[in-house]
Amino acid sequence: MLAHKRFFILGLLVTGMAVVFDQLSKWLIVEKIILPGHNVIEMAPFFNIVLVRNFGVSFGLFADHRQPLLLTAVSIAIVSILLTWLYKNTSKLGAWALGSVMGGAIGNIIDRVRYGSVVDFLDFHLGPYHWPAFNIADSCIFIGVVLLCGSSMFTPRTNQPEGLK
Protein backbone atom coordinates (compact mmCIF):
# COMPACT_ATOMS: atom_id res chain seq x y z
CA MET A 1 0.00 0.00 0.00
CA LEU A 2 2.90 2.37 0.69
CA ALA A 3 4.11 2.09 -2.92
CA HIS A 4 0.63 3.03 -4.19
CA LYS A 5 0.70 6.16 -2.05
CA ARG A 6 4.18 7.06 -3.29
CA PHE A 7 3.09 6.69 -6.93
CA PHE A 8 -0.08 8.70 -6.26
CA ILE A 9 1.96 11.56 -4.76
CA LEU A 10 4.43 11.40 -7.66
CA GLY A 11 1.55 11.66 -10.13
CA LEU A 12 0.14 14.67 -8.29
CA LEU A 13 3.57 16.35 -8.31
CA VAL A 14 3.90 15.76 -12.06
CA THR A 15 0.39 17.18 -12.50
CA GLY A 16 1.33 20.29 -10.54
CA MET A 17 4.57 20.80 -12.46
CA ALA A 18 2.78 20.49 -15.79
CA VAL A 19 0.13 23.03 -14.75
CA VAL A 20 2.74 25.50 -13.47
CA PHE A 21 4.94 25.30 -16.59
CA ASP A 22 1.92 25.49 -18.88
CA GLN A 23 0.34 28.48 -17.18
CA LEU A 24 3.67 30.30 -16.81
CA SER A 25 4.42 29.85 -20.52
CA LYS A 26 0.95 31.10 -21.49
CA TRP A 27 1.23 34.08 -19.16
CA LEU A 28 4.58 34.98 -20.73
CA ILE A 29 3.14 34.73 -24.25
CA VAL A 30 -0.07 36.66 -23.54
CA GLU A 31 1.33 39.31 -21.18
CA LYS A 32 5.01 39.76 -22.03
CA ILE A 33 6.07 38.37 -25.40
CA ILE A 34 3.33 38.89 -27.99
CA LEU A 35 2.69 42.58 -28.38
CA PRO A 36 -0.73 43.88 -29.44
CA GLY A 37 -0.98 43.80 -33.23
CA HIS A 38 1.95 41.37 -33.58
CA ASN A 39 0.66 37.80 -33.53
CA VAL A 40 3.76 36.12 -34.98
CA ILE A 41 7.39 36.13 -33.86
CA GLU A 42 9.72 34.25 -36.21
CA MET A 43 12.20 32.27 -34.14
CA ALA A 44 13.76 29.88 -36.69
CA PRO A 45 13.11 28.82 -40.30
CA PHE A 46 10.81 26.08 -38.99
CA PHE A 47 9.40 27.63 -35.79
CA ASN A 48 7.32 30.67 -34.83
CA ILE A 49 5.75 31.88 -31.63
CA VAL A 50 2.17 32.85 -32.38
CA LEU A 51 -0.91 33.77 -30.39
CA VAL A 52 -3.86 31.59 -31.33
CA ARG A 53 -7.12 31.24 -29.40
CA ASN A 54 -8.45 27.70 -29.78
CA PHE A 55 -12.19 27.57 -29.08
CA GLY A 56 -12.38 23.85 -29.87
CA VAL A 57 -10.42 20.78 -28.86
CA SER A 58 -7.35 19.18 -30.47
CA PHE A 59 -6.45 20.74 -33.81
CA GLY A 60 -9.39 23.16 -33.42
CA LEU A 61 -12.04 20.46 -33.82
CA PHE A 62 -15.51 21.64 -32.77
CA ALA A 63 -14.32 25.26 -32.68
CA ASP A 64 -17.43 26.39 -34.56
CA HIS A 65 -19.66 25.23 -31.71
CA ARG A 66 -18.01 27.48 -29.07
CA GLN A 67 -19.17 25.49 -26.09
CA PRO A 68 -16.49 26.31 -23.46
CA LEU A 69 -18.68 25.18 -20.56
CA LEU A 70 -19.39 21.82 -22.18
CA LEU A 71 -15.73 21.29 -23.10
CA THR A 72 -14.70 22.30 -19.58
CA ALA A 73 -17.20 19.89 -18.02
CA VAL A 74 -16.01 17.02 -20.23
CA SER A 75 -12.38 17.83 -19.37
CA ILE A 76 -13.15 17.88 -15.65
CA ALA A 77 -14.87 14.49 -15.95
CA ILE A 78 -11.84 13.08 -17.76
CA VAL A 79 -9.47 14.45 -15.11
CA SER A 80 -11.65 12.86 -12.41
CA ILE A 81 -11.43 9.47 -14.13
CA LEU A 82 -7.65 9.87 -14.53
CA LEU A 83 -7.32 10.81 -10.84
CA THR A 84 -9.09 7.58 -9.88
CA TRP A 85 -6.79 5.66 -12.24
CA LEU A 86 -3.76 7.38 -10.66
CA TYR A 87 -4.97 6.40 -7.18
CA LYS A 88 -5.07 2.74 -8.28
CA ASN A 89 -1.83 2.95 -10.28
CA THR A 90 1.03 0.63 -9.30
CA SER A 91 3.94 1.92 -11.38
CA LYS A 92 6.26 4.92 -11.56
CA LEU A 93 5.83 5.17 -15.34
CA GLY A 94 2.06 5.14 -14.93
CA ALA A 95 2.30 7.93 -12.34
CA TRP A 96 4.39 10.09 -14.69
CA ALA A 97 2.04 9.38 -17.59
CA LEU A 98 -1.21 10.03 -15.75
CA GLY A 99 0.22 13.11 -14.02
CA SER A 100 1.33 14.51 -17.35
CA VAL A 101 -2.07 13.99 -19.00
CA MET A 102 -3.93 15.42 -15.99
CA GLY A 103 -1.62 18.44 -15.79
CA GLY A 104 -2.11 19.19 -19.46
CA ALA A 105 -5.86 18.83 -19.20
CA ILE A 106 -6.01 21.06 -16.12
CA GLY A 107 -3.85 23.68 -17.85
CA ASN A 108 -6.30 23.83 -20.73
CA ILE A 109 -9.28 23.86 -18.32
CA ILE A 110 -7.78 26.92 -16.62
CA ASP A 111 -7.54 28.64 -20.03
CA ARG A 112 -11.17 27.90 -20.86
CA VAL A 113 -12.25 29.36 -17.52
CA ARG A 114 -9.97 32.43 -17.77
CA TYR A 115 -10.21 33.22 -21.49
CA GLY A 116 -13.12 31.18 -22.87
CA SER A 117 -10.58 29.47 -25.15
CA VAL A 118 -7.22 27.73 -25.01
CA VAL A 119 -4.06 29.75 -25.67
CA ASP A 120 -1.85 28.05 -28.28
CA PHE A 121 1.51 29.52 -29.28
CA LEU A 122 3.97 26.92 -30.61
CA ASP A 123 3.95 26.94 -34.42
CA PHE A 124 6.18 24.43 -36.23
CA HIS A 125 6.19 24.48 -40.01
CA LEU A 126 7.95 23.30 -43.12
CA GLY A 127 7.82 26.18 -45.57
CA PRO A 128 4.17 27.10 -46.03
CA TYR A 129 2.92 23.89 -44.36
CA HIS A 130 2.08 24.53 -40.70
CA TRP A 131 1.26 22.02 -38.00
CA PRO A 132 -1.66 23.35 -35.92
CA ALA A 133 -0.39 25.61 -33.12
CA PHE A 134 -0.22 23.97 -29.71
CA ASN A 135 0.99 24.66 -26.17
CA ILE A 136 2.84 23.06 -23.24
CA ALA A 137 -0.40 21.46 -21.94
CA ASP A 138 -0.99 19.78 -25.31
CA SER A 139 2.60 18.50 -25.25
CA CYS A 140 2.11 17.10 -21.75
CA ILE A 141 -1.06 15.32 -22.83
CA PHE A 142 0.68 13.84 -25.89
CA ILE A 143 3.75 12.71 -23.91
CA GLY A 144 1.52 11.25 -21.18
CA VAL A 145 -0.52 9.26 -23.69
CA VAL A 146 2.67 7.92 -25.31
CA LEU A 147 3.95 6.90 -21.86
CA LEU A 148 0.62 5.23 -21.06
CA CYS A 149 0.80 3.25 -24.29
CA GLY A 150 4.38 2.24 -23.52
CA SER A 151 3.43 1.32 -19.97
CA SER A 152 0.56 -0.86 -21.15
CA MET A 153 2.76 -2.61 -23.71
CA PHE A 154 5.78 -3.24 -21.50
CA THR A 155 4.35 -3.71 -17.99
CA PRO A 156 3.71 -7.34 -17.08
CA ARG A 157 0.06 -8.21 -16.40
CA THR A 158 -0.57 -9.64 -12.94
CA ASN A 159 -4.36 -9.89 -12.48
CA GLN A 160 -5.42 -11.51 -15.73
CA PRO A 161 -7.06 -14.92 -16.08
CA GLU A 162 -4.64 -17.69 -17.05
CA GLY A 163 -5.72 -17.78 -20.69
CA LEU A 164 -4.93 -14.08 -21.24
CA LYS A 165 -1.35 -14.01 -19.92
Image: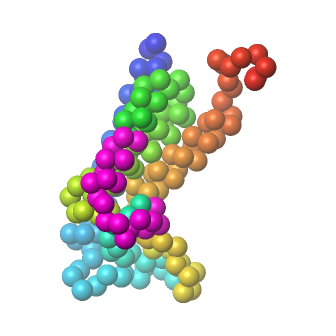
The colour scheme used here is rainbow
Residue at position x 55%, y 34% from top?
93
Expressed as whole percent of the image width and height from the top left, the position of residue 30 reads: 25, 69
Residue 55 falls within the magenta-colored stretch: no
Magenta stretch secondary structure, dominant: helix
Tell me if residue 68 can be seen. Answer: yes
Of residues 31 and 158, the one drawn nearer to the viewer in this rendering: 158
Spot occupied by residue 61 in the image (x, y as percentages of width and height): 45, 65
Q: Residue 78, percent across and down?
A: 40, 42
For the C terminus, give its image quadrant.
top right
Residue drawn at x 45%, y 51% as measured from the top left: 140
Q: Is residue 53 above or below residue 93?
A: below
Number of marks in the rendered image: 0
Residue 86 sits in which quadrant?
top left
Determine which quarter of the picture holds residue 137.
Answer: bottom left
Please tell me which residue is depicted at 38% across the width and 28% down the height of the picture.
9
What span is colored magenta in the figure?
A: 58-78
Closest to the observer: 120 or 35?
120
Asked whether 71 or 144 is in front, the reply is 71
Q: Residue at x 69, y 26 (%)?
A: 156
Q: Is residue 65 left or right of residue 36?
A: right
Question: Looking at this rendering, what residue extends furthest in the top direction?
Answer: 1
Out of 67 and 81, give the one closest to the viewer.
67
Residue at the limit of the structure toward the front, as seen here: 65
Query: Residue 42 at x, y = what percent?
Result: 41, 82
Instruction: Identify the residue at the far right of this view.
Output: 163
Q: Is residue 23 visible?
A: no
Residue 87 figure quarter: top left
> Is 96 situated left or right of 149 in this image?
left
User: Magenta includes 60?
Assistant: yes
- Above or below 37: residue 8: above
